[in-house]
Amino acid sequence: MSGHLVVVGGGAAGMMAAGRAAQIIAEEGGDAQVLLLEKTSRLGNKLRITGKGRCNLTNDCGVDEFISHLGPHGVFMRNAFARFFVRDTIAFFHAHGVPTVTERGRRVFPASNNAHDVAEALRAYCLAGGVQFRYRSPVVGLTPIQEGGWRVELAEGALVAQAVILATGGLSYPGTGSTGDGYALARALGHTITPLRPGLVPLVVAEEFVSRLQGLSLRNVRATLSQGGRLLGSEFGEMLFTHFGVSGPIILTLSSRGAEALATTGPAELCIDLKPALDEEALDQRLLRDLSSLARARYRRFLKGLLPASLIEVFAERTDISLDEPLGRFTAEQRARVRHLLKHFCLTVTGTRPIQEAIVTLGGVACDEIVPQTMASRLHRGLYMAGEILDVAGDTGGYNLQVAFTTGFVAGENAARALGNGR
Ligand SMILES: Cc1cc2nc3c(=O)[nH]c(=O)nc-3n(C[C@H](O)[C@H](O)[C@H](O)COP(=O)(O)OP(=O)(O)OC[C@H]3O[C@@H](n4cnc5c(N)ncnc54)[C@H](O)[C@@H]3O)c2cc1C
């Protein structure tokens, strides 16, 4: 093996790709050099803020379930997962000094709870293989050379590479360096970029009262997103009110399910079931019991037993019943209104927060233009893609980083093996 392999982007996927390529070259006695070009002055900026600084690096579920969490193109990952999957990721980090722990929902974190440890392990992996790093080196152009290989344009000149791995990430959190450059580079080379949308992003709500609920966290609720009667998604778990709308784990998941509809068709309805463990009848029995035991109290006291304190005022307004209403005078119709709102606390979703605030970018380089076993472009020899640049995006729970590690590993391995043999 000879010549240079250039990896564009020093995030989770790019570092894994560069490290694995250097390892393969060393194992096979090659003399090719791996060069990692990073736009910012540090590797793994986004990786270092993942999981609220703890880095949920993968999810220890089976492959079928894993793929079901990767959106409409998840199946593209099956071949690559056969090469490098969850157990390999855990073993990799363990071998590089980062033991892991598995938490609720099979989420895997570094035992140190420190995302920097994950980024540093990848950096050390690259260094051990002799990868050269170049910081503050944004790639601005990529051109195939007639006789084979690539001209890699940098702001301050150009390099020649035999193969290139594009691992420039998505469009979200641009302060980390991920500003979507790779989409333009891939598009200029003829690749299809499917529509880019914010994924795992808070939702904006029309009702003004949400700002009064800011900071309220609801656990064990069911939220259902629909549009014109069409179900977009339904999730059980935890959510949060913010000054502009709603966020939290189940809302982020729903935002990805409804992204296309919200972007193209307009507002949607988000209905929160505040008492998902009780069906309407069981809930009615509960309300009747409460009303009879609180006959001398007022509506405010009744709601105290049913809702978090900060929701009581808004809830009472929405039922159009005064908080001072004596429960002794409560009618069956009023009880029905309370019951209905407990099961259908509905909000109008006008859209998502901007892509800059999204956890991931939905859309990207079309998967059918990439060989799933190798991450090689089907359009150009010596071009590979890895990470979020691809049109694969996962739910929250460690799915996105595993995609980055797997595609990086597979791209690095195959790009290195193809060096010098004309494949
Ligand atoms: C706040 C937040 C929390 C998250 N938490 C989790 C989590 O806990 N678990 C999980 O699985 N996923 C999480 N994610 C998603 C996950 O971080 C990403 O999916 C993952 O980092 C993608 O890896 P990547 O290597 O493809 O891209 P990135 O990590 O974005 O790296 C891309 C790199 O390319 C560089 N670059 C860009 N353009 C150029 C250019 N022209 N030239 C050279 N370099 C360039 C960038 O500077 C950057 O370093 C989170 C995301 C965010 C924003």
Image (cartoon, grey):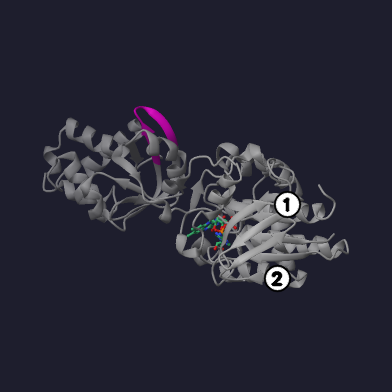
Q: Which of the 4 image quadrants contains residue 193?
A: top right
Label 2 vs label 1, nearer the camera: 2
Q: What residue is shown with label 2? A: 132
Q: Is residue 342 left or right of residue 420?
A: left
Residue 410, numbered circle: 1
Badge 1 element: helix
The span picked out in magenta is: 223-233
Q: Residue at x 16, y 44 (%)?
A: 317
Q: Residue at x 68, y 52 (%)?
A: 406
Q: Position of residue 191 (x, y in %)?
A: 60, 42
- Sequence-wise, which precedes: disc 2 or disc 1? 2
Q: Residue furthest right?
A: 29
State how far apart marks 2 and 1 are (Cα): 20 Å
Q: Residue at x 57, y 67 (%)?
A: 115
Q: Residue furthest front?
A: 146
Q: Is residue 423 left or right of residue 299?
A: right
Q: Which of the 4 image quadrants contains residue 165?
A: bottom right
Instruction: Name which residue type carries label 2.
Output: Gln
Q: Position of residue 308 (x, y in %)?
A: 29, 53
Q: Position of residue 385 (x, y in %)?
A: 65, 50
Q: Residue at x 34, y 50 (%)?
A: 246
Instruction: Name which residue type carries label 1.
Output: Val
